[in-house]
Image (cartoon, helix red, strand yellow):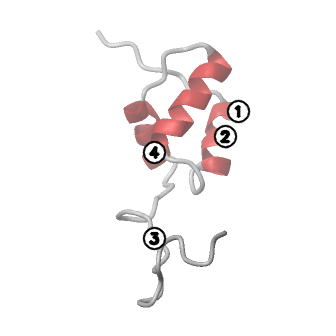
Amino acid sequence: MANYKRWTDAEREYIRANHKTMCDEELAKVLKSMTGEDITTSMVRRQRRHLSLKKERGRPVKEKKPANFIEGAGRL
């Protein structure tokens, strides 16, 4: 029989507070260092979904450079 992690209120609150600014992998690393337990990305993702916290879909949008932008121009 599988052993499931029992999430503490502090861990849940950390996920709630940081899920918009950190990816699941970063959250897993921080929680792992905080608790000393083996917390994986999929565990964080599952808990985030259980808490009904959604992330924006897709990749982040990069800044578009103007059409006349020349890399390195204007530097001394």
Please state which of residues 32 and 54 is positioned toward the viewer in this rendering. 32
Look at 44% across and 65% down and name the residue there. 60
The residue pinned by badge 3 equals 62
Q: CA distance from mark 3 to mark 4?
A: 30 Å
Disc nearer the start of the sequence (2/3): 2
Residue reaching furthest to the front: 76
The residue pinned by badge 4 equals 50
Look at 46% across and 59% down and name the residue there. 55
Q: CA distance from mark 4 to mark 2?
A: 14 Å
Decide: is 35 above or below 76: above
User: Do the residues bearing badges 1 and 2 touch, measured as CB atoms within 8 Å?
Assistant: yes
User: Where in the figure is residue 51, as x and y percent of width and height?
Assistant: 52, 48
Disc 2 marks a residue whose amino acid type is Tyr
User: Where in the figure is residue 49, as x and y percent of width and height?
Assistant: 43, 48
Q: Secondary structure at mark 4?
A: helix
User: Do the residues bearing badges 3 and 1 touch, measured as CB atoms within 8 Å?
Assistant: no
Left or right of 35 in this view: 26: left
The residue pinned by badge 1 equals 10
The residue pinned by badge 2 equals 14
Q: Secondary structure at mark 2?
A: helix
Disc 3 marks a residue whose amino acid type is Lys
Q: Secondary structure at mark 3?
A: loop
Disc 4 marks a residue whose amino acid type is His
Q: How many C-alpha atoms fall within 10 Å of the one at disc 1: few (<14), some, or many (≥20)?
A: few
Please state which of residues 17 and 51 is positioned toward the viewer in this rendering. 17
Q: How many C-alpha atoms fall within 10 Å of the one at disc 2: few (<14), some, or many (≥20)?
A: some
Disc nearer the start of the sequence (3/4): 4
Disc 1 marks a residue whose amino acid type is Ala
